[in-house]
Image (cartoon, rainbow, N blue to C red):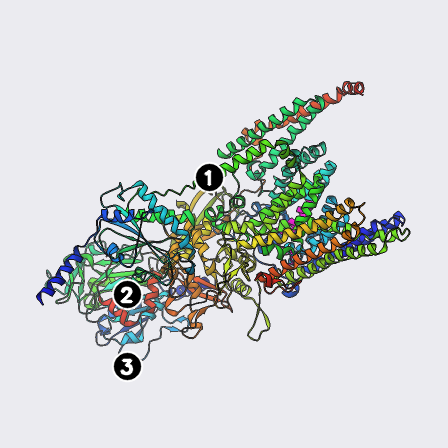
């Protein structure tokens, strides 16, 4: 509860400073002076600054002593941008476990590697996400290009509409790039695949990727909705190519730092069909109930109703009993509400879970679940015997016997005189 | 020099091709009435390690009483029955289900603890009984172990046979439980006698049937049997009596309130019986005797002393019961007379 | 006390004093005796409160206590329709319809009564002291019962016996708030009223017997014993040719009212007409109609031939009845015998077909020492009493004999039925002893013989001596019996089994309170809706003491659900985790006695878990895989692979070897040394609590990995060094690639 309040507070703060992401914007940029001349990337940083990101630069060199990501339990930065770093120094400064801790704590990470600089800690971190970038010195090559290491990639290779889609076809430039293999985890968002003619090669070694097996840009979203993006080439961000790549980079960072593709639930409710809540009247079997959930999407400025037609509700007790696709119902300024319509609870008592688990590629995960008991019929809630036509036979026979017995008693009493006289005779 | 090499080669060749045919095995098995080939120090390598076309089921067991292997003693006759059942259906040991599916039964038994067959050492046997299944071929070290499980009696045999069927894929293994002619004949004879006697002494039996006294005795005996823990013996199938570390017979399982030997039921039933008889005599016997001997002159001393004797008998029996109970629960603080020395 | 009882008898024989004075003295004596009997009955049951504290005992009482609390805080209607969503998650339990409400309603009634008269007592105290209170009433009912069998002196003896006999105390000490606590009282009252009804033919008594039968049905499943014993009594009497109209009116009244009333209990419902357990009563009801009709015809047409016709028709009707019963059962109209009932007759039935019944120690057969332990010298007076009753053999004696024979058999098969045997042991022994005292403790002729001296004084004197000796020995036995009972009660039957007595290193007595420590931890540190998986033995306690939702409990109504927990415990953690997660489990609780030497722990119960799970999933769980190559069930290095991989093993022994110096980590229950190498780490579960003596260990299911990795891989990753990671990372990954 407190946690969600904090998040709300954070939202308000964001709104105040006119920020674009759903969370604050303190960003740490790690770079290696030997590899990265910051001026060459000024356009990239400017685009971030224009979007109110607070950028802090930290050089990684032999003199760097420590880079704390946490102050005790509190995360110090919201976003982390890691440019290629050479050598083993980073491994000590930020080991792979710190990256994972930062990421699992909700920090977004953008990692950029270069064929000549694939630091272990970054690579291991990516491996844990199921992204396997080509190791050091493997270079993406296209022998049909003029310069084999300078590959132009068509926008047809873009894979995720949620991240970036182009109106008309164009080519991006990837110079001196690596490529990655991805595993089949559903949390991975492949963004840009390598062109078919390319391969990632190192002399005398088996190539790391061949053709569209490799990926040049890949995203990942973990269960706390933190996002991580890997880009295989530093030159991709250079001012020199910014005219070509700029829009893509902008959209990519927007997705990465959660300016878009962010949805939230305003909470799910379920009630009896007449609106009575569970707390005032617990459900029993075969009750008619309604389930409703509200969803909003973040535009970068405000929350607006989220429109979709594939939101499903599930009523389950170990196994699902119902799986209903929700229909759009009313909406207000910020939220679109979806409803299941009236449906009848199963004829089975037990403790059921009312849940919506909306996980779509490129969107933040929304999961709402509520565990409620559905009770059996109470002893006086069954139909009475006379309401069951089958029982009429038995009811009539019972009353028949009672009536006959009464008649018998009457006859017995009336005719008892003779009996007495018989007895007298016997005596 | 050369000849010695030749000799070695020849012996090697002989050992390699040394084989044993089904007929030879059959011949061996026919030497015993139960059709089991006994393994000994001389023949075991040859039998198990030479080339053959048949399955071998080998029981390694120890029926010597010193080993105290109850399962061995229990399973031994079952194994013999398995073998005889097999040869009853398949006189030449050949299954109907296929070519290479003959089966023979072998056994190595520790009959005295001083003389343990070498085959036990060869297979490093630490637990008996073990049942090995050797496959057609001739490798002495390729075999499967047939688990005997925790069941007893017919259940164990059935499970073991099911496993053999599974491993050998011989389907027509049957088990004919030995039919005990003598016992059925005996029971038939008893039934006949009883019926005959009832028929003959009908009036007497009828009288007996309406005899309250008989019914009373029967009922009370039944109750005493139950109180002695008869059902425990029946259900748990406990041992009759035990042996302590020095080899002496134990009549009572010491220190165990929840368990017992089956002989305990008999001892306790006798004690209860004595107690019941003496108290009953005190209660109805003495007054009846008094009445009966009313006119006898010298009955007075008898009538006066008899109750004391009976009460003493009760006391002694009860003391016995308590002291026996103390064996079962050594911490029990109340005793009448220390009589446990008679029982332990 | 018991000797006082016989004094009362000797007073009745005193003829010289006026009648009213005798009666007055008698009444005063009886009242005094009853006050002392009540005192003895209640005070000997208070050992548990004095030695430990006022606490609910064991397992089932915790459920009864919880239900009672529910009843006093809700209305009776809500109680009747109580759907309990905090047990058997996620199935829930229709608790109101599946319990015997007699116990709870009685204590709630007492609670309300006390409040009405201005004594607001805590419901827990009423529950704790419930059983001792009712033990007093049992003594009175036994007195009345025995009075009908013999006379009031035997009655007083029986009452004194039942008040302190350990066999009954075992289930009725303070805190043992179980159905049996009230059921034995009701059993004796019902039998007492039945005997009176049967003797007099009074419809009033028969109706009262039926009403108490109804009360008994509402309190305990053991009511089936009455349902079968009373018809059996009637049946035997009919066979003996002792039918009379008194039997007819008593039985038909009792059966009609009792059966209709018993069907009002939701848990019983239509069982009385649909279950084989109840068919004997129905059959005898039919039989007695026929016999009555036959008798009527006979009285009208007396002839010798009639007898033959009657016998033949009786046999035919009986035969038809059996065939009908068989047919109806075969076609499913009547439920066959319940499993528990089968296991009474076919003693191997339970072991093969229903391991859950066989796993309960209460359902084991009894060795002889238990009889002596529970009844002392009454056990050998019991057959004597039965025999003496045979000599009289009035109608009511037949009842006692039938009861004795049936119950001694049943008790031999199932130890929990010792409880129902105990009252009849007391009654029979009291009858025997009182008959003996009638003969030997009657010194009224001493007074009488002062006047006329016609016999030789020496023999007379010896006669007195012998009488004194005989009665003296038996009074001594009674004396010993009191000591025995007190000793047994104190040392064997007063432990609440929630708190365990022990001695510390200095030899001072201490209490081991791990259970409550753990349950309290759960109550204070976990979410209110947290679900706890533990073996069913602890379900009621977790519900009662920790107030957390459980998967399975001692109600054991759903074998499959229990098997789920068994399977989770018996499987490797990567199998258990999804299974438990599927059932929303948050915590897993295991009982481990290896540090303390507590032999009733989960590892010792483990094979039952395996067996029950194997019954449902024979392909996935197999008992034999938990034995090592030598067919032994072990926990040390030679334990089988399945054993070492099982969740139960890992949870029990996690960090256990670290407690000791190397090589000394011996499990005190099983006496085997468990080393660090045997215990592989847990990846899917994390230890959150271990009690002081390691008896209770609680594990939490780890959250699913945020990055979607398998938790086993996460564990491997956490443990692996950078070098290992490097080695792994430099290779091209080997999996189905995303294309």
Helix, strand, or loop for circle 1? helix
Nearer the N terminus, badge 2 or badge 3? Answer: 3
Q: Quadrant of residue A230?
A: bottom left
| Dot 2 crowding, Cα within 10 Å, few <14, some 14–19, many 20+ | many
* Drawn side of residue C334 relative to residue C101, left or right: left
The nearer-to-camera label among 3 and 1 is 1
The nearer-to-camera label among 2 and 3 is 2
The magenta stretch spans residue B192: no
Q: Are marks 2 and 3 on the same chain?
A: yes
Q: Which residue is mark 3?
A: A63
Helix, strand, or loop for circle 2? helix
Q: Which residue is mark 1?
A: B184
In this rendering, the answer to whether A58 lies above or below C203 is below
Stretch of the chain drawn in magenta: C169-190
Residue C316, percent from left and from top: 57, 27
Residue C274, percent from left and from top: 55, 36
Q: Which mark is residue A126?
A: 2
């Amino acid at each position: 509860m407190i946690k969600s309040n904090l998040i709300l507070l954070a939202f308000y703060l964001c709104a105040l400073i006119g920020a674009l992401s759903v969370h604050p914007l303190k960003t740490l940029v790690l770079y290696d002076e030997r590899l990265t001349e910051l001026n060459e990337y000024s356009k990239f940083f400017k685009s971030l600054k224009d979007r109110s990101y607070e950028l802090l630069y930290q050089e990684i060199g032999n003199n760097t002593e420590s880079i704390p990501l946490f102050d005790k339990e509190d995360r110090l930065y919201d976003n982390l941008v890691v440019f290629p770093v050479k050598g083993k120094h980073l491994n000590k400064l930020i080991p792979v476990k710190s990256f994972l801790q930062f990421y699992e704590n909700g920090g977004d990470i953008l990692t950029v590697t270069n064929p000549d600089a694939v630091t272990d800690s970054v690579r291991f971190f990516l491996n844990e996400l199921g992204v396997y970038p080509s190791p050091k010195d493997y270079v993406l090559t296209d022998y049909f290009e003029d310069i084999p290491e300078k590959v132009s990639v068509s926008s047809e290779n873009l894979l995720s509409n949620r991240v970036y889609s182009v109106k008309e076809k164009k080519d991006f430039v990837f110079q001196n790039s690596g490529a990655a293999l991805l595993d089949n985890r559903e949390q991975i968002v492949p963004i840009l695949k390598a062109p078919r003619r390319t391969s990632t090669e190192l002399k005398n070694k088996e190539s790391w990727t061949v053709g569209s097996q490799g990926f040049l840009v890949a995203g990942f979203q973990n269960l706390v909705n933190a996002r991580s993006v890997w880009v295989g080439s530093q030159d991709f961000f250079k001012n020199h190519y910014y005219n070509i790549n700029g829009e893509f980079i902008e959209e990519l960072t927007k997705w990465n730092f959660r300016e878009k593709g962010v949805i939230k639930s305003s909470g799910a409710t379920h009630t009896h069909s007449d609106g009575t809540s569970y707390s005032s009247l617990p459900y029993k079997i075969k009750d008619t109930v309604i389930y409703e959930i509200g969803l909003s999407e973040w535009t970068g400025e405000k929350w607006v109703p989220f429109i979709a037609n594939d939101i499903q509700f599930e009523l389950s007790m170990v196994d699902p009993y119902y799986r209903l696709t929700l229909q759009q119902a009313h909406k207000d300024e910020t939220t679109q509400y979806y409803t299941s319509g009236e449906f009848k609870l199963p004829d089975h008592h037990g403790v059921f879970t009312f849940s919506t688990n909306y996980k779509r590629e490129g969107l933040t995960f929304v999961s709402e679940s509520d565990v409620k008991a559905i009770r059996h019929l109470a002893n006086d809630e069954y139909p009475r015997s006379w309401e069951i036509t089958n029982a009429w036979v038995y009811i009539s026979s019972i009353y028949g016997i009672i009536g006959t017995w009464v008649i018998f008693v009457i006859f017995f009493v009336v005719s008892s005189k003779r009996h007495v006289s018989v007895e007298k005779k016997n005596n | 020099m050369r000849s010695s090499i030749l000799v070695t080669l020849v012996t090697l060749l002989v050992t390699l091709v040394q084989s044993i045919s089904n007929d030879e095995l059959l011949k061996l098995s026919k030497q015993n009435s139960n059709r089991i080939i006994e393994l000994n120090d001389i023949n075991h390598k040859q039998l198990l390690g030479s080339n053959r076309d048949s399955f071998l089921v080998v029981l390694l067991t120890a029926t010597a009483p010193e080993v105290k292997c109850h399962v061995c003693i229990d399973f031994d006759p079952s194994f013999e029955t398995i073998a005889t059942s097999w040869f009853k259906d398949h006189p030449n040991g050949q299954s109907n289900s296929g070519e290479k599916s003959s089966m023979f039964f072998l056994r190595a038994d520790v009959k005295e603890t001083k003389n343990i067959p070498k085959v036990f050492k060869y297979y490093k046997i630490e637990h008996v009984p073990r049942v090995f299944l050797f496959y057609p071929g001739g490798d002495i070290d390729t075999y499967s172990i047939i688990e005997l499980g925790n069941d007893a009696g017919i259940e164990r045999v059935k499970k073991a046979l099911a496993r053999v069927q599974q491993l050998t894929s011989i389907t027509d293994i049957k088990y004919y439980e030995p039919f005990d002619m003598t016992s059925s004949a005996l029971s038939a004879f008893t039934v006949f006698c009883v019926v005959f006697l009832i028929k003959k002494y009908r009036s007497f039996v009828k009288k007996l049937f309406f005899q309250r006294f008989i019914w009373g005795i029967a009922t009370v005996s039944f109750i005493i049997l139950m109180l002695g823990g008869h059902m425990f013996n029946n259900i748990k199938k406990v041992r009759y009596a035990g042996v302590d570390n020095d080899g002496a017979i134990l009549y009572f399982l010491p220190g165990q309130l929840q368990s017992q030997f089956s002989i305990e039921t008999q001892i306790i039933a006798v004690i209860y019986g004595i107690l019941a008889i003496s108290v009953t005599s005190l209660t109805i016997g003495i007054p009846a005797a008094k009445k009966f001997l009313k006119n006898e002159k010298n009955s007075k001393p008898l009538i006066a002393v008899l109750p004391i004797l009976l009460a003493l008998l009760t006391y002694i029996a009860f003391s016995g019961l308590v002291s026996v109970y103390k064996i079962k629960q050594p911490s029990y603080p109340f005793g009448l007379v220390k009589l446990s020395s008679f029982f332990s | 006390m018991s000797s006082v009882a016989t004094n009362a008898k000797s007073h009745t024989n005193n003829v010289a004093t006026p009648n009213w004075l005798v009666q007055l003295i008698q009444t005063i004596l009886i009242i005094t005796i009853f006050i002392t009997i009540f005192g003895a009955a209640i005070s000997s049951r208070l050992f548990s409160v004095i030695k430990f504290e006022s606490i609910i005992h064991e397992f089932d009482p915790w459920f009864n206590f919880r239900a009672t609390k529910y009843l006093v805080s809700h209305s009776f209607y809500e109680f009747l329709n109580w759907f309990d969503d905090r047990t058997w998650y996620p199935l829930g339990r229709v608790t109101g319809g599946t319990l015997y409400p007699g116990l709870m309603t009685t204590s709630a009634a007492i609670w309300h009564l006390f409040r009405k008269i201005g004594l607001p007592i805590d419901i827990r105290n009423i529950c704790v002291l419930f059983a001792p209170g009712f033990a007093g009433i049992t003594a009175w009912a036994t007195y009345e019962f025995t009075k009908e069998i013999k006379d009031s002196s035997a009655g007083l003896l029986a009452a004194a016996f039942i008040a302190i006999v350990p066999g009954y105390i075992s289930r009725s000490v303070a805190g043992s708030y179980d159905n049996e606590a009230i059921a034995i009282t009701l059993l004796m009252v019902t039998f007492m009223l039945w005997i009176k009804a049967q003797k007099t033919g009074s419809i009033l008594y028969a109706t009262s017997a039926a009403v108490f039968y109804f009360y008994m049905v509402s309190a305990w499943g053991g009511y089936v014993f009455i349902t079968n014993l009373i018809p059996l009594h009637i049946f035997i009497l009919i066979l003996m040719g002792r039918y009379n109209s008194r039997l007819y009116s008593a039985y038909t009244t009792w059966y009609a009212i009792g059966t209709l009333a018993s069907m009002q209990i939701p848990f019983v419902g239509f069982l009385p007409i649909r279950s084989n357990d109840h068919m004997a009563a129905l059959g005898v009801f039919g039989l007695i109609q026929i016999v009555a009709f036959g008798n009527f015809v006979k009285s009208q047409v007396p002839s010798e031939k009639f007898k033959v016709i009657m016998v033949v028709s009786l046999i035919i009707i009986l035969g038809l009845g059996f065939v009908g019963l068989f047919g109806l059962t075969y076609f499913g109209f009547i439920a066959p015998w319940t499993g528990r009932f089968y296991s009474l007759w076919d003693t191997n039935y339970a072991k093969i077909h229903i391991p859950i019944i066989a796993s309960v120690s209460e359902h084991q057969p009894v060795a002889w020492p238990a009889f002596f332990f529970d009844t002392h010298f009454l056990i050998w007076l019991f057959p004597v009493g039965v025999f003496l009753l045979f000599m009289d053999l009035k109608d009511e004696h037949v009842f006692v004999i039938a009861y004795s024979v049936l119950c001694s058999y049943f008790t031999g098969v199932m130890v929990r039925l010792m409880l129902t045997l105990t009252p009849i042991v007391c009654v029979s022994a009291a009858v025997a002893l009182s008959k003996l005292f009638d003969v030997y403790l009657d010194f009224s002729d001493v007074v009488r013989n002062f006047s006329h001296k016609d016999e030789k004084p020496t023999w007379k004197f010896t006669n007195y001596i012998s009488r004194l000796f005989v009665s003296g020995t038996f009074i001594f036995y009674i004396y010993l019996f009191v000591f025995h009972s007190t000793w047994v009660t104190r040392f064997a039957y007063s432990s609440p089994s929630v708190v365990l007595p022990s001695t510390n290193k200095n030899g001072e007595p201490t209490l081991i309170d791990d259970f409550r420590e753990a349950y309290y931890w759960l109550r204070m540190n976990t979410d209110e809706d947290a679900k706890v998986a533990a073996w069913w033995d602890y379900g009621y306690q977790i519900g009662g003491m920790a107030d957390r939702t459980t998967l399975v409990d001692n109600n054991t109504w759903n074998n499959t659900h229990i098997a789920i927990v068994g399977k989770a415990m018996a499987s490797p953690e990567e199998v258990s985790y999804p299974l438990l997660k599927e059932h929303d489990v948050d915590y897993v609780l295991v009982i481990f006695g290896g540090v303390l030497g507590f032999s009733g722990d989960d590892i010792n119960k483990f094979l039952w878990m395996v067996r029950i799970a194997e019954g449902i999933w024979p392909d996935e769980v197999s008992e034999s895989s938990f034995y090592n190559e030598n067919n032994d069930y072990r926990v040390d290095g030679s334990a089988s692979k399945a054993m070492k991989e099982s969740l139960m093993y890992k949870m029990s022994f996690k960090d256990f070897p670290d407690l000791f110096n190397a090589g000394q980590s011996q499990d005190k229950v099983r006496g085997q040394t468990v080393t660090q190498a045997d215990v592989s780490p847990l990846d899917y579960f994390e230890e959150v609590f271990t009690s002081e003596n390691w008896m209770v260990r609680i594990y939490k299911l780890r959250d699913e990995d945020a990055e979607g990795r398998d938790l086993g891989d996460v564990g491997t990753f956490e443990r692996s060094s950078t070098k290992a990671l490097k080695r792994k990372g430099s290779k091209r990954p080997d999996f189905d690639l995303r294309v």
